[in-house]
């Protein structure tokens, strides 16, 4: 029988998405489980690959963030493109897209000059045939 995510697992994931270091006792209390039961649920979600990692989200007031839309040579495998993009400092989340754009990246830098140099580094990758950059102005959620 296939394993399915139930409503409690969904609640746990939503809580951890907002606070990855939430103690299991508090997590359990919020979803109606004991601390050991909450710990087992989280461990099970990790073991099954639903939770791949715990991370932090740093809000840097002086930082510049952008969404970078990237078009690549269609003859280059996606895995190779992603591997090369991941080597550029400041590249965060990456999404492969359908439609006119091949990839979207969250790109961060401490200032505009550094952001420009990081965009240039991406533009100079052999597989990249074009980019468009949108600077993030304000985060709402």
Image: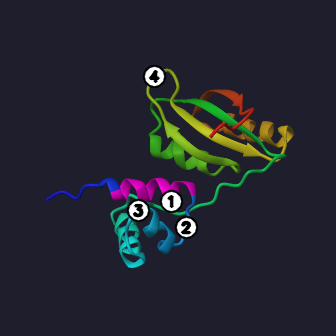
Classify 56 as above or below 133: below
Q: Secondary structure at mark 4?
A: loop
Chain-order first, disc 3 or disc 1: 1
Q: Which residues are magenta?
A: 8-18
Please name the residue that numbered disc 1 is placed on: 16
Residue 26 lies in the magenta stretch? no
Whole-percent x, y for residue 135 in the image: 73, 31
Chain-order first, disc 3 or disc 2: 2
Q: Are there few (<14), some (14-19), or many (20+) residues within 10 Å of tag 3?
A: some
Classify 130 as above or below 81: above
Whole-percent x, y for residue 26 in the image: 51, 70
Please name the residue that numbered disc 2 is placed on: 22
For discs 4 and 3, the disc positioned in front in the rendered view: 3
Q: Real-space Cα distance between discs 1 and 4?
A: 32 Å
Residues 102 and 16: in front is 16
For discs 3 and 2, the disc positioned in front in the rendered view: 3
At 53% from the left and 45% from the top, the residue drawn is 82
Q: Is residue 36 left or right of residue 127?
A: left
Q: Is residue 128 left or right of residue 46?
A: right
Residues 77 and 6: in front is 6
Please name the residue that numbered disc 4 is placed on: 99
At 68% from the left and 34% from the top, the residue drawn is 123
Q: Are there few (<14), some (14-19), or many (20+) residues within 10 Å of tag 4?
A: few
Q: Secondary structure at mark 2?
A: loop
Quadrant where the N terminus is found in the figure: bottom left
Q: Secondary structure at mark 1?
A: helix
């Amino acid at each position: 029988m296939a394993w399915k995510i139930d409503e409690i697992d969904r609640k746990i994931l939503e809580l951890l998405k907002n606070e990855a270091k939430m103690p299991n006792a508090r997590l359990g209390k919020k979803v109606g489980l004991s601390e050991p039961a909450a710990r087992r649920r989280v461990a099970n979600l990790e073991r099954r690959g639903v939770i791949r990692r715990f991370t932090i989200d740093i809000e840097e007031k002086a930082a510049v963030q952008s969404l970078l839309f990237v078009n690549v040579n269609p003859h280059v495998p996606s895995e190779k493109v992603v591997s090369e993009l991941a080597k550029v400092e400041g590249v965060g989340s990456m999404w492969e897209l359908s439609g006119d754009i091949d990839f979207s990246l969250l790109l961060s830098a401490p200032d505009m000059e550094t952001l420009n140099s990081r965009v240039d580094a991406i533009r100079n990758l052999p597989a990249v045939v074009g980019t468009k950059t949108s600077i993030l102005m304000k985060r709402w959620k």
